[in-house]
Image (cartoon, rainbow, N blue to C red):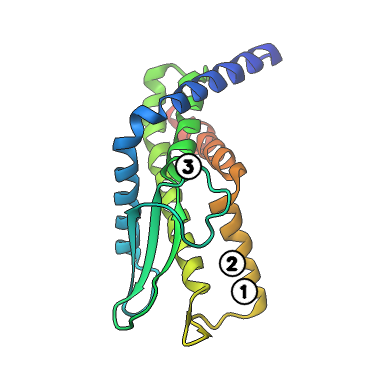
């Protein structure tokens, strides 16, 4: 593929991505509840929180770690079932944490000329599955990080050393807060599903 064709494909992908972003106000009423349901399912299945502590995804905004969050529309509450007091909470965005990376992946598949559309369908399905597994992991990581910042009677609930806390912070910060992750992760998923060993074997 020539440099000119690469630039053309990149431009088309960008335009398609922008079109899908412009459609967000129309899709938000259906997508936001679906995002919260998927996140709730991931937390219920994996259950990253020990003991009688549960996480609930609700419509709303605010909480910890909510500085400069793009289009926040979800409030995640961590509640200890056996203890009274203020629940720990943090904000999430169905747009930033779900819809945006999905549009990047769809734009890449929609404009690539590597294969005909029929040959792209199966890699697209696998790519969407893989991406949403990574989005679920991102949510679980955010819940666990919020839990690590919680205290009971003034004591941290997690006994982690300074190095472990630092590593957890950097992983959480990249996965949950960095805009780069919303573009880099779909790009890697696209490459794996379109150009990976199994994809070349099926081509």
Q: Residue 59: x percent and y percent? A: 33, 51
Describe the element under mark 1 as helix, strand or loop: helix
Q: Residue 166: x percent and y percent? A: 65, 69
Say which of marks 3 and 2 sits in front: 3
Horizontal relation, residue 187 to residue 116: left or right: right
- Which residue is the site of mark 2? 168
Q: Identify which residue, 66 or 123, lies in the foreground.
A: 66
- Which residue is the site of mark 1? 164
Residue at 49% x, 75% y is: 150
Q: In the image, is residue 140 above or below residue 113?
A: below
Residue at 63% x, 67% y is: 167
- Which residue is the site of mark 3? 71
Marks 3/2: CA–CA distance: 25 Å
Q: Residue 127: x percent and y percent? A: 43, 37
Describe the element under mark 2 as helix, strand or loop: helix
Marks 1/2: CA–CA distance: 6 Å
Quadrant including the N terminus: top right
Q: In the image, is residue 41 above or below residue 115?
A: below
């Amino acid at each position: 593929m020539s440099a000119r064709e690469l630039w053309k494909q990149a431009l088309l992908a960008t335009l398609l991505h922008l079109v899908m972003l412009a459609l967000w106000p129309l899709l938000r009423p259906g997508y936001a509840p679906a995002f919260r349901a998927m996140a709730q399912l991931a937390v219920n299945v994996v259950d990253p929180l020990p003991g009688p502590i549960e996480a609930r995804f609700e419509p709303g905004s605010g909480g910890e770690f909510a500085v400069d969050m793009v289009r926040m529309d979800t409030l995640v509450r961590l509640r200890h079932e056996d203890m009274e007091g203020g629940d720990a909470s943090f904000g999430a965005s169905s747009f930033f944490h779900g819809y945006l990376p999905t549009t990047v992946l769809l734009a890449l598949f929609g404009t690539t000329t590597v294969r005909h559309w029929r040959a792209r369908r199966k890699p697209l399905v696998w790519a969407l599955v893989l991406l949403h597994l990574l989005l679920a992991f991102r949510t679980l990581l955010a819940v666990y990080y919020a839990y690590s910042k919680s205290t009971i009677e003034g004591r941290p609930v997690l006994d982690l050393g300074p190095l472990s806390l630092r590593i957890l912070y950097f992983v959480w910060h990249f996965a949950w807060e960095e805009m780069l992750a919303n573009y880099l992760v779909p790009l890697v998923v696209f490459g794996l599903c379109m150009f990976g060993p199994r994809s070349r074997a099926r081509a």
